[in-house]
Amino acid sequence: METNDAIAALTALGHATRLAAFRLLVEAGPDGRVAGDIGEALGVPGATLSFHLKELVLAGLVVSESQGRYVCYRADFQAMNGLIQYLTHNCCAGSPGVACAPANAPACGC
């Protein structure tokens, strides 16, 4: 991941509604969720949610797919993992210890 891509992703996640939506989509896994379900789960009106989901899509963290009258949103797990790798690339300056490894972090096979 390039620096500008990481900045865009972190900027998008820097808003409470977008962070909550992204976490909800990560929890949903590869099946994702339709916009109406996301709005209901977060208590966010449709127009507001649409704006926030668009920002996540533009940042490359979420993909959308039309399904008839609905739009399904999914977390882009490759982009999420790329951001995590970017942030931890030189973690602990290459020390052999795992002091900075996340505790109990399972690998995401999504």
Image (cartoon, rainbow, N blue to C red):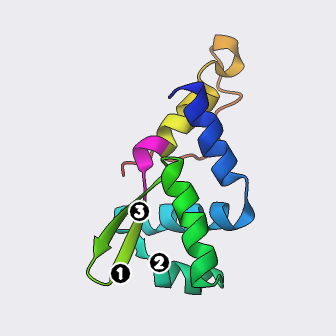
76 part of magenta stretch: yes
Disc 1 residue type (three-letter): Tyr
For the residues bearing labels 1 and 3, Cβ distance under 8 angstroms: no
Q: CA distance from mark 1 to mark 3?
A: 13 Å
Residue 107 horizontal/vertical position (percent):
45, 44
Let me know if residue 103 appears in the view. Answer: no
Disc ID at residue 17: none
Neighbor class of circle 3 (other Cα within 10 Å; few <14, some 14-19, many 20+) is many
Residue 68, given in percent of the width and then of the height, sits at 26, 81
Left/right placement of residue 29 relative to residue 56 reads: left
Mark 1 secondary-structure assignment = strand
Alpha carbon distance from label 3 to label 2 = 10 Å
Q: Earlier in the sequence, mark 3 or mark 2?
A: 2
Query: Which segment did they paint magenta?
Result: 75-79
Residue ID at (61%, 41%): 8
Which secondary structure type mostly characterizes the magenta part of the structure?
Answer: helix
**Circles 3 and 2 in contact, beta carbons < 8 Å:** no
Dot 2 lies on which element? helix
The residue carrying mark 2 is 35
| Residue 56 percent location from the top left of the image | 55, 56
Give me the disc on residue 70.
Answer: 1
- In terms of image quadrants, where is residue 70? bottom left
Between the residue at mark 2 and the residue at mark 1, the CA separation in whole angstroms equals 7 Å
Q: Amino acid at mark 3?
A: Arg
Q: Is residue 71 above or below residue 53?
A: below
